[in-house]
Image (cartoon, rainbow, N blue to C red):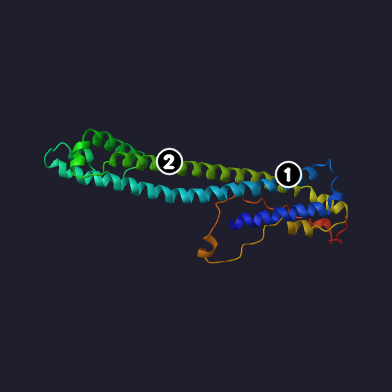
Amino acid sequence: MNNLFNRQFNMLSAVIGFSQRYSGLFPANGLAASLFAVVAMALPELHETLGVQSSSMASNRAGSSSKAEARAELLHCLDVISVTARSIARVDSSVGDKFKMPRDVSDQALIGHALGFVDNATQLKDEFLSHDMDPEFIDELKTAINRFKDAVQGHVNAKKIQTSATGNLATTLQKVLDAIYRLDGIVPNTLRKNGVSLSEWDNVRKVPRARVASRSTTDAGNTQIPAVPLPAAVPPSSSAGPPATPAQP
């Protein structure tokens, strides 16, 4: 899990714990209680969305590997046909231009190129068979094309899900942090009125500093979490006097 997100998530859990300890100070129909509820309801949503994102990232990585393998298989099929076509072209020079290997082309261009091989090879199938090609070589090429198509589409779908999940994380996290920022303008007033120290609120709503670690350690297995800055806490008033002993809810 991304280190910043992990620390923000721990802060949200601490805020919920604070609201539960001091629930008696915040009427259920009041603004503060409704904002605390926003935070509480968001945690399961963040958990679920993070799970979707992690799963889609794993699928994305697997899809990249599967696509690479399918691409290599397709290129191999094309290469076998192209090499044989060069031999045929010694007799019929027009054949060679029909089976040139693609170089550094996009996925869709490669698929189009391979379909061209299918059409041209079908017309010259007897010539290829006379060069001892496998009788099923055209069907094998079609299978390789379809496998590559599926791998490309699967990779695209996984990237879409990952992008959507990352956007949902950013939206939900921003909503929660906005609620906490608003609570910074309410909670200190409520605590002063009830003789409760402000220090506990100041502590729970802060995001702990990150531990210094090597880049290789911090980067390993990181989930992509959108950077959502945490609003600065509203500083307690200097006229509040010395902090009182926390009251029991």
Q: Report the front residue among 151 and 184.
A: 151
Residue visible at 60% across and 49% down?
Answer: 51
Helix, strand, or loop for circle 1? helix
Q: Position of residue 79 (x, y in %)?
A: 26, 47
Q: Position of residue 91 (x, y in %)?
A: 11, 40
In the picture, residue 37 is in which quadrant?
top right
Q: Which mark is residue 150?
A: 2
Quickly name the residue at label 1: 38
Q: Report the front residue among 199 and 64.
A: 64
Residue visible at 67% across and 54% down?
Answer: 9
Residue visible at 55% across and 51% down?
Answer: 224
Q: Report the front residue among 183 and 95.
A: 95
Specify the amino acid type for callout 2.
Asp
Left or right of 69, for residue 43: right
Helix, strand, or loop for circle 2? helix
| Residues packed near mark 2 inside 10 Å, few (<14), some (14 to 19) or many (20 plus) | some
Location of residue 123 with respect to 235 vertically, above or below: above
Location of residue 126 with respect to 21 vertically, above or below: above
N-term mark: 2 or 1: 1
Quadrant for the C terminus in the image: bottom right
Q: Position of residue 116 (x, y in %)?
A: 28, 35
Quadrant for the N terminus in the image: bottom right
Q: Which mark is residue 241?
A: none
- Residue farthest toward the left in the current orientation of the protein: 91
